[in-house]
Image (cartoon, rainbow, N blue to C red):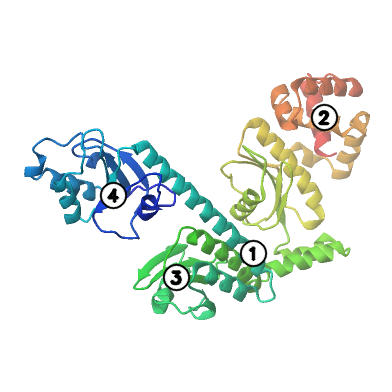
Amino acid sequence: MPDLAVPPTPPVPLAALLAREDLGLRQIAGPADADTVIHWAHTSEMHDPYPYLLGGELLLTAGVHIPEAAGSGTYFADYVSRIVAAGGVALGFGLAPVHDTVPRALVAACDHYDLPLVEVPPRTTFSAVARAVWQLMAQARLAELRRVTEAQQSLTAAASRPDPVTSVLRQLAQRVGGRAVLFGPDGTEIAAAGRDAAGAEALAGLARVVRPTGTPTSASPTSATDTVPGAHLAAYALGTGQGFVLGVAAPRRDQGDHTIASVAAVLLSLLTGEHQSRTGADRSSALVRLLLGAPPEEVAALLGGDRWTVVHARPDANAPDPVAASALGAALGSALIDLGPDVVRVLVPADRAPAPQPGWTLGVSAAAGPRDWPAADTQAARALARARATRAPLVRHGPSGRPGLAGLVPHEEAEAHARTLLAPLAGNPALTETLRTWLSLHGSWDRTAVALAVHRNTVRQRIARCAALLDTDLDDPDVRMELWFGLRHL
């Protein structure tokens, strides 16, 4: 048997197709197995359909390919054996327009190879059979989606109850009709719900397969499945990294069971993760203290570090959504995420250098303590604007590491000079930011327009206004250098 490339749609029981009175189908050979399912219908008049089958088909034929002397030789045996070898699950034979009856030798061959043979009456077209298959698939898909949605809602409600872990396990066991178990890091059964199912020892062994080993050179799978007599087993490593595993044993595995179990695994990951590490409690404590008036430097220790970088990220395609923002935070190594309409802000510990992320444009601030977080937020925003303008995946703010001319002037004197130099622009942040961006991009109108999300003519008008207010020639490189020096200290 080849590997079946079946589509991601629910299979259709052959019995459901036979029950359609409008089709008038009748099974005349092969086993009448209620578990026989088909994944699609395919029509072929080839004498050897093997090369054209993927597996799981109801093959429909009118017998055009059958030679006159086929009944006296091995033609039908060879034909049916090739269908079975290709993974076909049933054969439909149309009585018109070539044959008035189904050949007896074909009936015998289907009985011999245990291939269900369905008689298609003259009034029923093959297109009608195929359409019925897809209608039954759509109905099954709708029922599956409804079942999964209801399960998600009930699992989420269970997670908010006073005993959330047990409630989630109980609801999961009810939905899959089996047993759900939460294994601890040492492999012991912490909590369980549902009726006893076969394969309890095998389920514990399957949990060991997905439990993290702690060895950096060996990565464990996040999920695994197995089958034992009387039960289908599945194990899911919870995303806390603490070694918790969800095990599920059910007498059968229906469509949607994996999705339902995955939802339960996510909820249990949140529940066990927050309780195992104090990260969640510490973040809540930091938030409460800030709301009650504590300065940021007093609560920074609860977040896990003294110095942080601010990252501004913008997706390359659509507007950011909560799922994408959470995935970005996980990739950057931080759960401190602020989702805005266009930009996601992430507070990242300074010891974790942000790297470019596929599908995102990033601006990264210099490392800063809590007292300087607002300034770091501004740095990250400017770095993101420059990254978008230059089409770079990531731009970092900060000195190059080499001593510069700015270090020769005392900071207080540099600030006083900047305020005096740029006083004509005071009170107009749009002009100041446009001038800063335009100078940083070497006077490029187009890149500045991209960075500021305005039209290039708007950039030209603002720069002209800056030149008029400052009463200077912005084409002069000395003037540009002095203005850039001032803007760096403003």
Quadrant for residue 123, please give it. Answer: top left
Mark before the other along the chain sequence, 2 or 1 = 1
Q: CA distance from mark 4 to mark 1?
A: 42 Å
> What is the three-letter code of the residue carrying label 3?
Ala
For label 4, count other residues whose C-alpha is less than 10 Å away and answer few (under 14), some (14-19) or many (20+).
many
Mark before the other along the chain sequence, 4 or 1 = 4
Q: CA distance from mark 3 to mark 1?
A: 21 Å
- Label 3 belongs to which residue? 250
> What is the three-letter code of the residue carrying label 2?
Leu
Q: Give the label on residue 483, or none.
A: 2
> What is the three-letter code of the residue carrying label 1?
Thr
Q: Is residue 256 left or right of residue 33?
A: right
SS at mark 4?
strand
> What is the three-letter code of the residue carrying label 4?
Ala
Q: Is residue 239 visible?
A: no
SS at mark 3?
strand
For label 1, count other residues whose C-alpha is less than 10 Å away and answer few (under 14), some (14-19) or many (20+).
some
Q: Is residue 403 left or right of residue 46?
A: right
For label 2, count other residues whose C-alpha is less than 10 Å away and answer few (under 14), some (14-19) or many (20+).
some
Q: Give the label on residue 363, or none.
A: none
Q: Is residue 202 left or right of residue 178?
A: left
- Label 1 belongs to which residue? 156
Q: Is residue 107 left or right of residue 90?
A: left
From the image, state whether disc 3 or disc 4 is nearer to you: 4
SS at mark 2?
helix
Q: Where is residue 383? Give x, y as percent.
A: 70, 39
From the image, state whether disc 2 or disc 4 is nearer to you: 4
Q: Where is residue 264? Give x, y as percent.
A: 57, 65
Q: Where is residue 411? Give x, y as percent.
A: 85, 44
Vertical relation: 425 (above or below) 84: above
- Label 4 belongs to which residue? 90
Mark before the other along the chain sequence, 3 or 4 = 4
